[in-house]
Image (tube, rainbow, N blue to C red):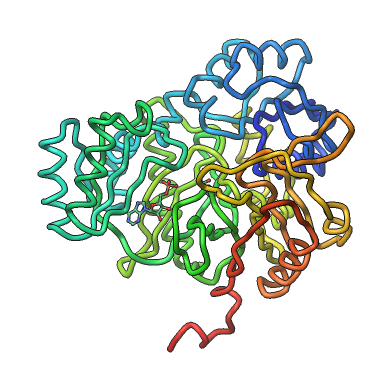
Amino acid sequence: MTARVLVIGRGGREHAIVWKLARSAHIGEILCAPGNPGIDELAECVQINVTDLDGIVRLATDRRVDLVVVGPEDPLAAGLAGILDAAGIPVFGHTAAAARIESSKSWSKVLMASTGIPTARSIVATDPASGRRAIAEIGGGGPVVIKADGLAAGKGVVVANDRAEAEAALASFMSEGAPGKAGTTVVIEERLTGPEVSIMLLTDGQDVRILAPSCDHKRAFDGDLGPNTGGMGVYTPTARIDQATMARIEETIVLPAVREMARRGSPLRGVLYPGLILTSDGPRVIEFNCRFGDPETQVVLPTTPEDLGEWSLAVAHGSLRHTPQPSSSGAAVGIALASRGYPGPYRSGFPIHGLETAASDPDVIVFHAGTARLDRGEIVTAGGRVLTVVGLGPDVVSARAKAYQAAGEISFEGCWMRRDIAATESQKPGQHEG
Ligand code: AMP
Ligand code: GLY
C-alpha cells in the first residue's frame, strides 16, 4: 500500500521534494498546496496558501492524506504541525516549540551555549544601550554580525565591517522596527571567517539521517559580491568536508542539538539544517534552520539514491532507525535564473522560453521557483528567483557544464544568473593555492 502525501509550499525546494517523492516506492498520490506550474506536472496542486493553517488541515482531513510534508519555516513557526497532530494526521515537520531552533536566534544561541555546540561568540541585547555595549565588546570596533531575533526572510542579518555600520544596523533593527517585528531582540555575534557549508539531516527526534553537504552562493554577483539573496546557485558534494570533519559535525553539532531538543521536551521531527562556517578551529554553527534549504534541496535530493518517501513516513511515525543510511551518488550543480532587479524590486509576467529543450537532457532537471501558468498555458515569470536549473554528472565539473548549458537554453526578459557557481570547487586539486 502506498501513502497519499500533501506537500506544503510553492518554491524550487518544494518542486524538488515533490520530484523526489514522485520516485518513491512508498508514495502513491501527491497533493501540493499551493504548488507551482512545475509541481503541477507531478502532483495535484490545490490553491491554499502556506499560512492558511485551517485550510491546510481541512484539505488533509478531507482528502484523508497519510502524511503532510511541510516545506517552508513560516507554517512550522505558526504551529501547523501541532494542529495536524491534534487532528491525528502524520506530519513531517516540527512543532512551533521545536521550530524555535530557527524562529528565535536568541533561543537557538542559548541552546548551543548550554550544550557546548561550537558557534560564534554572541550577546543578546534587548535595548539599544546594551546593544551598543555588545557591539563594542564583541567587535572591538572591527567586524561584527547583527542578527534580528525572529524570522525575517533573509533580511535579518547584517555582517558589519565596523562599529558605525554595526550601530546603524542595530538602530534599524531596534528602533525603526525593521525587518517587521523580528528585530526587538537582537543577537550581536562574532564574525567568523572561512568557507560556508550547508548540512541537512532528517530526524524523528532520536535518530538522524545526514545528507551530503552542499554549498550555497548567497551573494547576488560573481565573486560573492553584492547583496544577500535567497541563493543564486549551489552544488554538491564538496571537497571542503572530508569524512573526519563530517564525523566531527555529527558528534559536536548534530547529535547534541537533536538530543538537547528532545531533553527539553521539544523533539525535532523533520529537517535540521545547520549553516556552518569552516573556521581554522573547525566547523561552527552560524544558524540552525528547521527545514530543507533552498536551493540546497534541488541538488541534494537528486543525488541521494535512497527513498525520501520511506524516510518521511518514518520521521512522522518515529521509526527512522529502521530506514537505510543515506549515500550519495554523483554530483549536481544548480543555477538560479533570476529576474532583472532581484533581490531588489523586479517585474514579473514575462514569457519563459526553452524550458522543454533544457529539460530534454536526462542529466538536467529544471525546478520551478517563481513561475506562473497563464490561462492559455503559457509559463511566465512570477518571482525574483524564477528557476533552479540543475545539471547532474559524475563530478562537479561535468555537472556544472550540464547546468550552464541548460541554463543557456532558457530565456525570458531580464533573465540573469551568476557565472561562477561551483567554479572554485571545479578547480583541480592544487589550483586552490597561489
Ligand atoms: P541568513 O541567515 O541565511 O540570512 O544568512 C546570513 C549570512 O550572513 C550567512 O549566509 C553568512 O554568510 C553570514 N553570517 C551569518 N552569521 C555570521 C557570522 N557569525 N560570521 C560571518 N558571517 C555570518
Ligand atoms: N539556502 C539558504 C536557506 O535555505 O536558508
Residue 308 shows in this picture: no
The answer to whether 284 appears left or right of 212 in the picture is: left
| Rendered view: 384 above or below 160 | above
Point out residue 393 in the picture as x, y percentages from the top left corner. Answer: 75, 68
The answer to whether 127 appears left or right of 96 in the picture is: left
Badge count: 0
Point out residue 20 in the picture as x, y percentages from the top left corner. Answer: 75, 44
Residue, x 35% and y 26% (percent of image)? 181
Residue, x 61% and y 24% (percent of image)? 50
State which quarter of the image contains the N terminus: top right
Q: Which of 212 and 15 is in front in this view?
A: 15
The answer to whether 1 appears left or right of 132 in the picture is: right
Point out residue 380 in the picture as x, y percentages from the top left corner. Answer: 76, 41
Residue, x 72% and y 56% (percent of image)? 389
Residue, x 53% and y 57% (percent of image)? 216
Point out residue 298 in the picture as x, y percentages from the top left corner. Answer: 67, 51
Residue 362 lies in quadrant: bottom right
State which quarter of the image contains the C terminus: bottom left
